[in-house]
Image: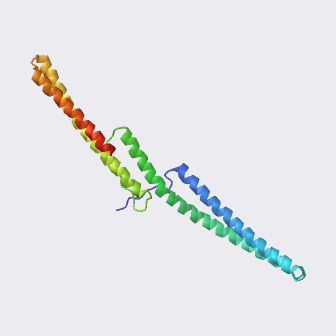
Amino acid sequence: MEKRRRKLIVNRQFQSKYLVLTLGLMIVVAVILAWITFYINWSRLSSNYPQILVERGLYQVFQQISGTIFWTNLAIIFVAVCVGGTLVLVASQRIAGPLIRFKKVAESIAEGEPVTTIRLRKKDELRGTEKDINKIIKAVNELQSKNSEMNKEISNIREKLSHNLEREIISRESLAATVQQLAEMVTKFRSTKSEQRR
């Protein structure tokens, strides 16, 4: 089942920026179109039929029709702004939500905490980035696991050396074997780092 976000506004700054830009553009375009329509009709009527407008009282009729057109356009603009605003909020949520999740994952990785893979909703944007982030998470988890194993091995070696030094029973062969183990671990660590760079 698809997980739904409960809040429509998940990143106020990001979403309000695009909401204001989109709605502002819609309002400006609607007002310009209404004005152009009115201006074109009025200029054609007044230039082609100036006497008829005055003599037959069509000027007043045109003013009434213009008022009706104005209020109708205003109502259409209001509905368009409401619907458009909601659509912009939903669309921006589908971008902002994944960005917030990516940020939380990055913070967890930076703090060295184990991280589980991300799963975005079907309609969320940045699904391709989700796959890339999950590859990074997998690589980081593998490195953390290998690091933990190496730390255990080093701890065991340290305890063994410490125990042998306390008893003063360490031989040259034993010390050489321990140094060899440490050298192998360093080589293993370097090869792990070079594999991760590829």
Q: Which quarter of the rendering shows the N terminus?
A: bottom left
Residue 31 lies in what quarter of the image? Answer: bottom right
**Is residue 147 shown to the viewer in this render?**
no
Q: Residue at x 33, y 50 (%)?
A: 135
> What residue lies at 50% left-to-right and 50% top-to-bottom?
11
Q: Is residue 148 left or right of residue 93?
A: left
For residue 179, above or below residue 57: above
The part of the image, by quadrant, that contains residue 188 is top left
Depth check, front residue: 24 or 162: 162
Give the image location of residue 112, x and y in percent. 34, 38
What is the x, y in percent for residue 180?
16, 29
Q: Is residue 193 above or below residue 3?
A: above
Judge whether 165 appears above or below 114 on screen. above
Q: Residue at x 61, y 67 (%)?
A: 80
173 left or right, relative to 126: left
Instruction: Give percent across and percent down for residue 77.
Output: 65, 67
Q: Position of residue 51 (x, y in %)?
A: 90, 81
Quick one: 10 or 191, which is closer to the camera?
191
- The one of 148 and 22 positioned closer to us in this rendering: 148
What's the residue at 37%, 52% (across, down)? 132
Classify residue 88 by image quadrant. Answer: bottom right
In front here: 138 or 54? Answer: 138
